[in-house]
Image (cartoon, helix red, strand yellow):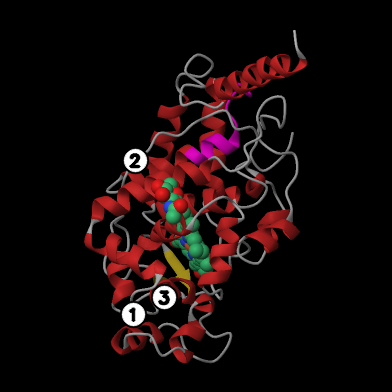
């Protein structure tokens, strides 16, 4: 066989092997209860704490942006100490509880990375769009605070720098705006939006005054006080986040910069999402699939952890 056709055959085999391993039906034979177990675990957690839906969604984002979706964010220490994570990420116990339920049914079969990807989807489904999660990601045996600080976007960034961080993960401007729509649910701490309240001009005055009441100016006071990222419907997954941006009611600097000047690239995308909820739902689902596919570890890479916070 000519060496070129041999390499074609090899490539086809490799492609077949890879696609056989990342697929929505990955656990159908090896752990048929996996998806239902994750779904009920998420539902229980969200019913006792509605904010948990937002926290699980964010956990998946912070996992995928650092070394890919490999559950590195769940390992104790390391990434969890990075700037955007420490004192902020929530939901570790929920994932650990789901993992132990899944382990009871199927020992060392389902990865923490997959559990997180499915939990993020199931968190949004109440009121928001759904999508099919491909499975077969494996877990890392490392995590890096340095990489987390390099790759996670802080809320102080402008559009160009935000775009650079997302583009580095294969996500385009439409994906970035759609994914920012995750801020239709959840809360932020005063320390992350104080400077916007007191220093920025493109903020609705009544909105600013209302937020200032629980986020006073002196540095350090009320740092941890929470405000909803979407003041209109704080716990409902809808397109109000984009409507708010058009009214200068974005909470974070990194939210409002997406709608600064009418007619810009991100502004056009936001106009579309603000006027058409289905357009947002479809773009969000597509972008979540893309984000969930960032650099997965495929067998024989990686491992299946028994406990999500440890490599053993
Ligand atoms: C565009 C760049 C982004 C920046 C700069 C950013 C920044 C932030 C910040 C500062 C907070 C508040 C954290 C705190 O105060 O403790 C937050 C919360 C949140 N973020 Fe983002 N974020 C971005 C994109 C995303 C994406 C892509 C997602 C998911 C797809 C997401 C989902 C969330 C959720 C759901 C919350 C609320 C979490 C909770 O209530 O526990 N964010 N984000
Ligand atoms: C961005 O990616 C989405 C898929 O997530 C695709 O539909 C869209 O055409 C892309 N946009 C650009 C400008 O490449």
Is residue 47 at least partly visible in the picture? no
Which residues lie in the magenta part?
Answer: 107-117
Q: Disc 3 on helix, strand or loop? A: helix
Pointer 3 or 1: first along the chain: 1
| Label 2 Cα neighbours within 10 Å, binned few <14 / some 14-19 / many ≥20 | some
Residue closer to the observer: 8 or 98: 8
Residue 130, which numbered label? 2
Q: Horizontal and vertical percent for residue 65?
A: 60, 52
Residue closer to the observer: 297 or 103: 297
Please identify the quarter of the rendering in which residue 236 is found: bottom left
| Label 1 Cα neighbours within 10 Å, binned few <14 / some 14-19 / many ≥20 | many
The Cα atoms of the two marked residues, 1 and 2, are separated by 29 Å
The Cα atoms of the two marked residues, 3 and 2, are separated by 26 Å
State the quadrant of the C terminus.
Answer: top right
Q: Is residue 288 magenta?
A: no
Pointer 1 or 2: first along the chain: 2
In the rendered structure, are the residues bearing label 3 and label 1 in contact, judged by CB atoms less than 8 Å apart? yes
Residue shown at 73% from the left, 48% from the top: 143
For label 3, the residue is 256
Q: Horizontal and vertical percent for residue 47?
A: 34, 47
Please identify the quarter of the rendering in which residue 167 is found: bottom right
For label 1, the residue is 248
């Amino acid at each position: 066989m000519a060496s070129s056709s041999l390499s074609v055959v090899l490539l086809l085999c490799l492609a077949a092997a890879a696609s056989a391993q990342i697929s929505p039906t990955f656990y159908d034979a090896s752990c048929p209860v996996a998806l239902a177990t994750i779904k009920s675990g998420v539902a229980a957690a969200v019913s006792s704490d509605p904010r948990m839906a937002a926290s699980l969604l964010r956990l998946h984002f912070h996992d995928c942006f650092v070394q890919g979706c490999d559950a590195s964010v769940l390992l104790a220490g390391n990434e969890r100490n990075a700037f955007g994570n420490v004192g902020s990420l929530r939901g570790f116990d929920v994932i650990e509880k789901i993992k132990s339920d899944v382990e009871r049914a199927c020992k060392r079969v389902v990865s923490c990375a997959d559990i997180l990807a499915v939990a993020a989807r199931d968190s949004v489904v109440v009121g928001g769009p759904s999508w099919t999660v491909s499975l077969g990601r494996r877990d890392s045996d490392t995590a890096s605070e340095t990489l987390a600080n390099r790759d996670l976007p802080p809320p102080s960034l402008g559009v160009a720098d935000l775009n650079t961080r997302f583009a580095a993960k294969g996500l385009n401007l439409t994906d970035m705006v759609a994914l920012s729509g995750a801020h239709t649910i959840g809360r932020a701490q005063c320390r992350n939006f104080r400077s916007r309240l007191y220093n920025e001009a493109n903020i609705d005055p009544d909105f600013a005054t209302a937020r200032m009441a629980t986020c006073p100016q002196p540095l350090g006071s009320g740092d941890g006080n929470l405000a909803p990222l979407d003041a209109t419907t704080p716990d409902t997954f809808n397109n109000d986040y984009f409507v708010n941006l058009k009214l200068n009611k974005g909470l974070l600097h990194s939210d409002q910069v997406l709608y600064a000047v009418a007619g810009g690239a991100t502004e056009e995308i936001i106009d579309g999402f603000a006027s058409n909820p289905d357009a947002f739902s479809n773009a969000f689902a597509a972008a979540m699939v893309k984000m969930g596919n960032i650099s997965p570890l495929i067998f024989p890479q990686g491992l299946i952890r028994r406990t999500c916070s440890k490599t053993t």
